[in-house]
Image (cartoon, rainbow, N blue to C red):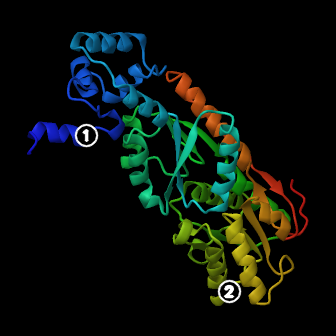
Amino acid sequence: MPQPEGSDRRERALPSFYKQVYVGITIYDIAEEAGVSIATVSRVFNDNPRVSEGTRAIVQEVAERLGYQPHVSARSLARRQTETISAIVPMLSNYFYAEVLKGLQDRMSASSFDLLVYSAPTLDEIEGQVEKALHRGRSAGVMLFSAPIKGDLERQLQHSDTPVVLVDCYHPGFDSISTDNRLGGEIAAEYLLAAGIREPAVLMANPHSVPASHRMQGFRGALERKGVHLAEDHLVVSSDGYHDGFNEQAGYDGMMTLLEAGIRPDGIFATSDVQAIGAMDALRNAHHSVPEDVQIIGFDDLPIARYLGLTTLRQPMHEMGGRAFDLLMERMAHPESTVAHTVFAPSLVDRHTTRSATLA
């Protein structure tokens, strides 16, 4: 039997767990009468602390006046779903994210929350995954990893009342956890120059990636302060393919691009450890020695970096995941509190892919 036009639109607009299993007054009716969102009504009925006392009183008064009684099974389902934390992660199989997620899961293990991970193979697919996490009623809170917060994505987050914590990226309006990537790039440049490098090159990931672009900015700035010019037309090789260039093949291909062009820099800064590992393989296949012919420094300090003797910039990945969960819990408990930003400083790990250097 055909449904009234308005009724059909209403059913499509509501997340599934809000739909009541009986005909009568619904939370949609209460939200409309009280002048609030259906999410706010749901929070009131589930005793969520993220509702002001004034708003709670209005919703409860409207519900009582309209004779609304929430269905027990619907409330139970809603509670289960709001005990889920969502993480939107680009390039899920990327080693860096795996380490951060380990820290997140370890910290969550003592809580009642479950983790739901949305993977976006490219930065272009982030917005769609954020839409799922924010607007399907699945998440009590959301963590968004390594995404430029601008344009439609920025508007999505600003218009949502779901608590959000940014990981490995920054926006002044949201709590965030990050590493000072510019500082890491500066340390890499200063170290290579102190080790005698005079013609460095960069194996760059996707230039639109926030971490990669900031590492590049720091590296270039430190070189320029020392009077060393980085010729981007032939000494910077970018990759925006698989995993936005954060992969071994991108490092291998980037190094081969330099070698096949007759360019052999004496030092390489790779914007991730995995790119550095690919570059080491390319140099070995081309019969060049590391660090005798070419010195290499990476970024992340993945577990494998220690076994390969890779000099790199260490990020506290496990700690970042744990701190992100703590920050999200604080935001959920105190939604009106001041925005907080935690920035970790990277540290140099000197191993065997560079020669000893003395930093001033």
Pick the front one: 247 or 116: 116
* Res. 115 in view: yes
Residue under the point 66% across and 70% down = 202
- Compared to residue 192, the image places residue 214 above or below, namely above
Q: What number is the disc on residue 13? A: 1
In the rendered view, does 97 fall on the left or right side of 331? right
* Res. 192 in view: no
In the rendered view, does 19 fall on the left or right side of 213? left
In the rendered view, does 140 fall on the left or right side of 108? left
Q: Which residue is mark 2?
A: 259
| Earlier sequence position, callout 2 versus callout 1 | 1
Residue 122, percent across and down? 48, 63
Task: Give the class, few, some or many, for how many residues have Cα within 10 Å of label 1's Cα (few <14, many ≥20).
Answer: few
- Compared to residue 260, the image places residue 136 above or below, namely above
Residue 146, percent across and down? 55, 52
Point out the frontmost of discs 2 and 1: 1
Residue 304: quadrant of the picture: bottom right
Residue under the point 85% across and 76% down = 291
Pick the front one: 119 or 215: 119
Amino acid residing under circle 2? Leu
Helix, strand or loop at label 2? It is helix
Residue 274, percent across and down? 69, 68
Pick the front one: 215 or 209: 209
Amino acid residing under circle 1? Ala
Residue 281, percent across and down? 74, 81
Residue 192: quadrant of the picture: bottom right
Query: Distance from label 2 to label 1 (Cα)?
Result: 56 Å
